[in-house]
Amino acid sequence: MPQYIATRRVQFAETDMAGIVHFANFYRWMEETEHEFFRSLGFTIMEPQDNDTYLGWPRVSASCTFERPLKYDDEFQVRLDIERIGVKSVTYAIEFWQEQRIAYGRLKTACCICGAHANIRSIPIPEHYLALLHESDELPRKTGKETQG
């Protein structure tokens, strides 16, 4: 499947006392890029349903391996690939790049119906979502989005 690519710039608040990006930001950027990918397909990560419920995509697992540091004002890319579409879940392979790879990770999400009283149950991915995810093979996956300070 083609990549969805988001371009970002490191903000001062995302760095630690050593002047490099705090590791937790990589997980946030993974999630933000997934949300941008969903919006590029025309839907949202929290889709309202009937009876005060919504279709959501909570995390089942997340991992990230760090190879090189990022510093304040560095521009970089977050590259998202769909690694696997299961019956009830989607797994993404995500890489962070400048001239070289900075970090890489995985994000697995489950398709769920979420209720008003914090009731959550996994469901098969609805057909219209599957169609859009599979159609994404044919769509350009680049975005010019860049966060600025």
Image (cartoon, rainbow, N blue to C red):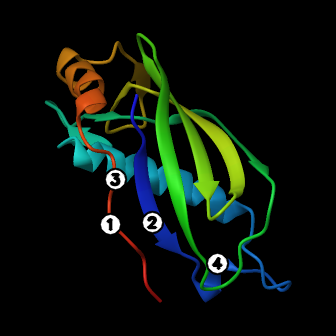
Q: Residues within 10 Å of mark 2 (few under 14, many from 20)?
A: some
Point out residue 147 in the picture as x, y percentages from the top left corner: 42, 77
Front position in the image: 30 or 95: 95
Residue depicted at x 47% and y 89% = 149
- Gap in Å between the C-alphas at discs 1 and 2? 6 Å
Place of residue 51 in the rendered image (x, y in percent of width and height, measured from the top left): 16, 31
- Upstream in sequence: badge 1 or badge 4: 4
Residues under numbered marks 1 and 3 in contact, where contact means CB atoms less than 8 Å apart = yes
- Residue in the picture at 22% in, 26% down: 135
Q: What's the amino acid at mark 2? A: Thr
Residue pointed to by mark 3: 142
On residue 14, which mark appears? 4
**Which numbered marker is on residue 130?**
none
Q: Residue 7 falls in which quadrant of the image?
A: bottom left
User: Is residue 145 shown left or right of residue 70?
Assistant: left
Can residue 44 be seen at all in this image of the molecule?
no
Q: Nearer the viewer, residue 115 or 81?
A: 81
